[in-house]
């Protein structure tokens, strides 16, 4: 058997991490389903906002464009995961529009047109940049900034958990999926020496670890308090 070269080993590790990231991403894509079950059951979007799905769509579109050969070579696994994510976001937006109030419908539709218009400007503008490396740097910077802002959004939830000492609003499987997907793409970016991938996903991995540690701490604290109250009631 011919031994693998270091470059071949890195490529195998990169592909394995990318495939794992694609698989774990489904946990994130499926996480809004309980919310939309409630919306469909109540026939109303209540106080829920459609903006996270609008922003999620823009983020997926930018990152999917970055992964295409027209921007960066050999990053198709980035395009696949974000293309699937874009489809999920569009499905959630359509459901949101179906069940929201009339005035909100026009607002959401306006945001959708803005997202696709902005994405068209990004695509056309980047194609006008003939130097591939410069095009990659510009789109990579945009995708990196978009991912960092997306991964930073749980900071509000982390603050809420610490303040309320409750993990009620921080679903465990969502936190776990965030950590696993971010860690996978952090490794993917590391193996491919792509800072536009490993930097934002490294931040996402750290935030995922923080969420899991908080979940473990406050969940065990809640269980301990409940046990102590139960013992006290029989004393």
Image (cartoon, rainbow, N blue to C red):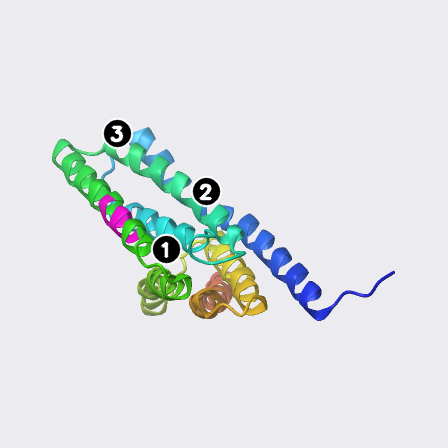
Residue that numbered label 2 is attached to: 84
| Structural distance between the alpha carbons of marks 3 and 2 | 22 Å
Q: Residue at x 37, y 60 (%)?
A: 143
Compare residues 140 and 38 and report the one nearer the observer: 140
Which SS type dominates the magenta stretch?
Answer: helix
Question: Disc 3 vs disc 2: which is toward the camera?
Answer: 2
Which sits in the foreground, 214 or 68?
Answer: 68
Q: Earlier in the sequence, mark 3 or mark 2?
A: 2
Is 11 a magenta residue? Answer: no
In x, y percent, where is residue 52? 29, 50
Instruction: Please provide the residue range marked out in magenta.
Output: 117-122
How far apart, in angstroms, are the residues tagged by discs 3 and 1?
A: 26 Å
Q: From the viewer's perspective, is 21 left or right of 149?
A: right
Report the disc number at residue 232. Answer: none
The answer to whether the residues at label 3 and label 2 have Cβ atoms under 8 Å apart is: no
Residue annotated with mark 3: 98
The x, y position of residue 53, in whole percent, is: 31, 46
Give whichever of discs 2 and 1 has the lower sequence position. 2
Q: Quadrant of residue 33?
A: top left
For the question of whether residue 171 can be seen, the reply is yes
Residue 235 appears in the picture as rendered: no
Q: Nearer the viewer, residue 70 or 171?
A: 70
Is disc 1 placed on a helix, strand or loop? loop
Residue 197 spot, x, y in % from top left: 46, 64
Q: CA distance from mark 2 to mark 1?
A: 26 Å
215 sits left or right of 16 in the view: left
Residue highlighted by disc 1? 169
Extreme front residue here?
130
């Amino acid at each position: 058997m011919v031994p693998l070269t270091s470059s071949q080993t890195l490529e195998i590790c990169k592909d394995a991490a990318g495939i794992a990231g694609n698989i774990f991403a489904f946990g994130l894509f499926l996480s809004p389903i309980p919310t939309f079950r409630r919306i469909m059951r109540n026939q109303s979007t209540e106080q829920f906002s459609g903006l996270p799905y609008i922003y999620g769509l823009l983020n997926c579109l930018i990152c999917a464009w970055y992964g295409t050969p027209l921007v960066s070579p050999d990053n198709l696994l980035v395009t696949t995961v974000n293309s699937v994510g874009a489809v999920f976001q569009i499905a959630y937006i359509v459901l949101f529009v179906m069940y929201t109030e009339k005035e909100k419908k026009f607002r959401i539709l306006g945001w959708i047109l803005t997202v696709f218009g902005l994405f068209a400007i990004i695509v056309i503008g980047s194609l006008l940049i003939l130097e591939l490396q410069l095009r990659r740097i510009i789109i990579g910077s945009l995708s990196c900034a978009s991912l960092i802002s997306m991964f930073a959004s749980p900071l509000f939830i982390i603050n809420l958990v610490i303040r309320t000492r409750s993990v009620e609003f921080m679903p465990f499987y969502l936190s776990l999926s965030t950590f696993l997907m971010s860690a996978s793409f952090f490794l993917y970016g590391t193996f491919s020496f792509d800072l536009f991938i490993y930097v934002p996903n490294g931040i996402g991995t750290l935030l995922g670890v923080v969420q899991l540690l908080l979940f473990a701490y406050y969940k065990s604290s809640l269980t301990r308090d409940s046990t102590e109250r139960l013992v006290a009631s029989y004393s």
